[in-house]
């Protein structure tokens, strides 16, 4: 069966990564679906807790069902679940995988909660992602003030104790548009050491948006005010994918930024436009274009369906 486990193993073996793309409405999901279809790529469609409550679970499940009908190699994932209850809810709703993000707790408590989620999810055939270390950034439900890099020894103990199927590691990425004040860097040495200890564990990179400066320019040219925006470089992501075991790359900011910069442009250029389809449609097109390029040139998952 070509389930998520199958694609994670395929990605590990062939050194490509599944994009884990966040959606928060029909158009952002359509952008992901269209990009995955055009590139013949498997992908993960992620909803955060706040996106789940924004859309409502019935809409999320109906949208995901439609997306999977169009591309059966799409997998619904709960991003940054903070409690046992929300993870259980996602499992019961029929998600393919859940992330329990207990990385803010101390190590033993993180193990305890992650293990509890894994025991429940695995009984229902749902995969589990855990996280150790902390990934900097401020989002609705994701908050950490500084990076605390993942310790490879702790990663080893964590994976053994919890039975997670995927492990999110903190190696220098962060959430949102302001990832770096200087040149982007990633601690590849941490990946190397984790891989020595856990050679077959799928690794996950959060905060992996590249924050294309052309999109930031469009955003600012049409009334936006983003300053000092900087993402991870494509080169670093390519290295993480092709030379390491990073097989899930989380991207939300690049979708938001492409969508919103294009929407701003349409609205600024057409001051009498009142039809949402005119600006949301253009936002959707731009996001699809950015995602297709990412799938082809950075994740190398094109044609892997
Ligand atoms: O990593 C977190 C995602 O970007 C989700 O953010 O809670 O604002 O939907 P959100
Ligand atoms: P970005 O903010 O870099 O897109 O990261 C998204 C993410 O990690 C979702 O879990
Ligand atoms: Zn994240």
Image: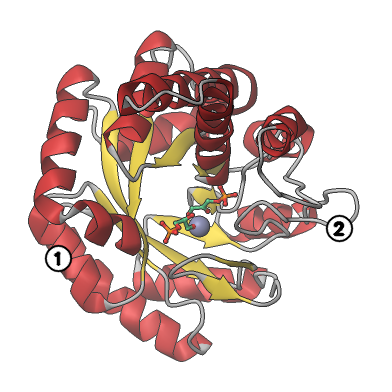
Q: Is residue 290 left or right of residue 84?
A: right
Q: How many marks?
A: 2
In percent of width and height, residue 72 lies at 21, 24
Q: Quadrant of the C terminus?
A: top left
Q: Earlier in the sequence, mark 2 or mark 1?
A: 1
Using the rendered view, name the quadrant where residue 212 is placed.
Answer: top right
Q: Is residue 185 left or right of residue 263?
A: right
Secondary structure under the numbered disc 1 in the rendered image = helix
Q: Residue at x 14, y 54 (%)?
A: 57
Secondary structure under the numbered disc 2 in the rendered image = loop
In percent of width and height, residue 142 lies at 49, 69
Q: Is residue 68 above or below residue 248?
A: above
Q: Is residue 283 above or below residue 116?
A: above
- Please identify the residue farthest to the right as the structure is shown: 182
What residue did someone put label 2 on?
181
Distance (Cα) linking label 2 and label 1 = 38 Å
Nearest the eye: 86 or 115: 86
Question: Mark 1 vs ligand 1: CB under 8 Å?
Answer: no
What residue did someone put label 1 on?
89
Mark 1 crowd level (few <14, some 14–19, many ≥20, 10 Å Cα): some
Nearest the eye: 188 or 32: 32
Question: Mark 2 vs ligand 2: CB under 8 Å?
Answer: no
Q: Residue 239's mark?
A: none
In percent of width and height, residue 131 lies at 49, 67
Using the rendered view, name the quadrant where residue 290 is placed.
Answer: top right
In percent of width and height, residue 20 lies at 44, 41
Q: Residue at x 27, y 51 (%)?
A: 97
Q: Residue at x 41, y 89 (%)?
A: 109
Residue contact between numbered discs 2 and 1, judged by CB atoms under 8 Å: no
Mark 2 crowd level (few <14, some 14–19, many ≥20, 10 Å Cα): few
Is residue 15 in sight in this rendering? no
Nearest the eye: 100 or 37: 37
């Amino acid at each position: 069966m070509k389930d998520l486990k199958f694609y994670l193993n395929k990605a590990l073996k062939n050194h490509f990564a599944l994009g884990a793309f966040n959606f928060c409405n029909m158009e952002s999901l359509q952008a992901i679906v269209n990009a995955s279809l055009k590139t013949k790529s498997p992908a993960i469609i992620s909803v955060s807790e706040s996106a789940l409550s924004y859309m409502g679970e019935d809409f999320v499940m109906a949208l995901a069902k439609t997306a999977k009908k169009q591309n059966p190699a799409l997998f619904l994932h709960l991003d940054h679940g903070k409690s046992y209850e929300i993870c259980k809810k996602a499992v019961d709703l029929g998600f393919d995988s859940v992330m329990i993000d207990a990385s803010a707790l101390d190590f033993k408590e993180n193990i305890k909660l992650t293990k509890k989620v894994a025991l429940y999810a695995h009984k229902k055939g749902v995969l589990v992602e855990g996280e150790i270390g902390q990934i900097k950034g401020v989002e609705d439900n994701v908050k950490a003030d500084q990076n605390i890099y993942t310790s490879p020894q702790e990663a080893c103990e964590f994976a053994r104790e919890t039975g997670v199927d995927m492990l999110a590691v903190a190696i220098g990425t962060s959430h949102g548009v302001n990832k770096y004040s200087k040149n982007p860097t990633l601690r590849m040495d941490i990946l190397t050491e984790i891989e020595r200890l856990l050679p077959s564990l799928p690794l996950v990179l959060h905060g992996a948006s590249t924050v294309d400066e052309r999109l930031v320019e469009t955003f600012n040219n049409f009334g936006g005010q983003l300053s000092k925006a900087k993402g991870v470089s494509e080169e670093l992501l390519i290295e993480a994918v092709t030379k390491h075991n990073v097989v899930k790359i989380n991207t939300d900011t690049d979708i938001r930024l492409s969508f919103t910069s294009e929407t701003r442009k349409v609205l600024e250029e057409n001051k009498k436009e009142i039809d949402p389809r005119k600006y949301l449609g253009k936002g959707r097109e731009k996001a699809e274009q950015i995602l297709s390029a990412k799938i082809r040139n950075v994740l190398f998952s094109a044609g892997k369906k």
